[in-house]
Image (spheres, rainbow, N blue to C red):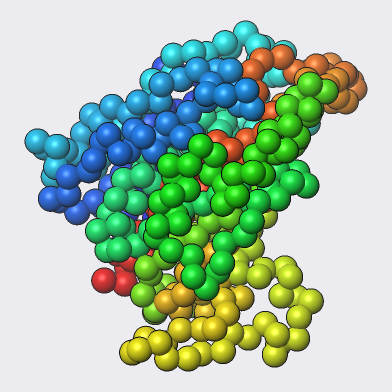
Amino acid sequence: MSSVFGNCIKVSIFGQSHSESIGVVIDGLRAGFKPDIDKINAFMKRRAPGQNAVSTPRSEADEAHIISGLADGVTCGAPLCAIINNTNTRSKDYSKLKEVPRPAHSDFPAFVKHSGFNDIRGGGHFSARLTAPLCFAGALCMQLLEKENIYIGAHISSIKDVHDSDFDMVSVSKAELEKLKNAPVPLLNQEAWPLMEQTILSAKAEGDSVGGIIECACTGLKPGVGEPMFDGIENRIAQAIFAVPAIKGIEFGRGFESAKLFGSENNDPFYFDGGEVKTKTNNHGGILGGLSSGMPIVFRAAFKPTPSIAKEQDSVNLLSKHDEKLKIEGRHDPCVVLRAVPCVEAATALAVYDLLLENV
């Protein structure tokens, strides 16, 4: 199924961008945990639309309503289900797209797969709107991970060709990750934002969009968590990360850059720090053989430019079977990267918590 993730916990996301509600079911949570709902809502607000000039003007509160799985505010062993109401939809903006698919969007393959019955409004089940329940599930898992002193955080590494500083992959800390969550913009260097914002707004003014890269880190995971081959940490994180629409690539540690190095340059020398084995560098990004090494897990995810742009584009009419010009209407992010930062954190939390349960 396209909507279920996890081995020890099962996460299923349902709904469409313009359906009455969207939501998530999380099965396998242990009983006796009291989630901090205010903290979850604060996390989800970081993803919510309509908060600034560089995001879609669609305004949604994105408050989750838990309808099962808790008794007196505590997990009771039943599947936990939360719904989020859609309140600010404009479905008429999408009426033309049933016949004329948007380039770089799911419209055409979804039309073929579902014999033309796919919900085109806002992208239906393929919409980034579905990252709201993903963020709910991830925020809850983050609280469970923090009880084990495992912390996850991310920042905007770049918008188009404007870059932030990078994590120090050897020494990224809990304090640094928590600071990012409370920063005005999730950046290590706040001075990078004015040029990033200008880049986004300039593209928007031209009826265009831009993409970027998010760098994410996870600290506190002890050595030996994970599995080789198909269930390695890279595999599981990547599977969860690609649930976030617009992601087109992922790399761990030095990633593709390591292909240019000698082994003597890329290998991370071991040493003892007190009684713990650590590495002097962290080119491996905290993962060796699919297992955690005890060093911070660090990866980067690449986001394509938002495909829904105001510029006229070439497309086809699926009913008349002729080429046709398309001018997209509606409300769209000129860059998804800012709002995607908590989505990357949430997807990572799902993967890491599920792996942790497997290795208890």
**Farthest-out residue, front:** 191
**211 sits to left or right of 316:** left
What residue is at 55 percent from the left and 17 percent from the top? 58
Q: Measured from the top left, where is residue 284 in percent x and y?
A: 58, 76
**137 sits to left or right of 334:** left
**Farthest-out residue, top:** 92
Residue 21: image quadrant is: top left
What residue is at 72 percent from the left and 68 percent from the top? 256
**Farthest-out residue, left:** 72
Up/down of 250 relative to 2, above or below: below
Up/down of 81 relative to 252, above or below: above
Residue 92: image quadrant is: top right
Q: Measured from the top left, where is residue 334 in percent x and y?
A: 69, 28
Q: For the C terminus, give its image quadrant.
A: bottom left
Q: Measured from the top left, where is residue 23 in percent x and y?
A: 38, 31
What residue is at 45 percent from the left and 57 percent from the top? 176
Is residue 261 at all visible to an observer of this figure?
yes
What residue is at 37 percent from the left and 86 percent from the top? 276
**255 sits to left or right of 140:** right
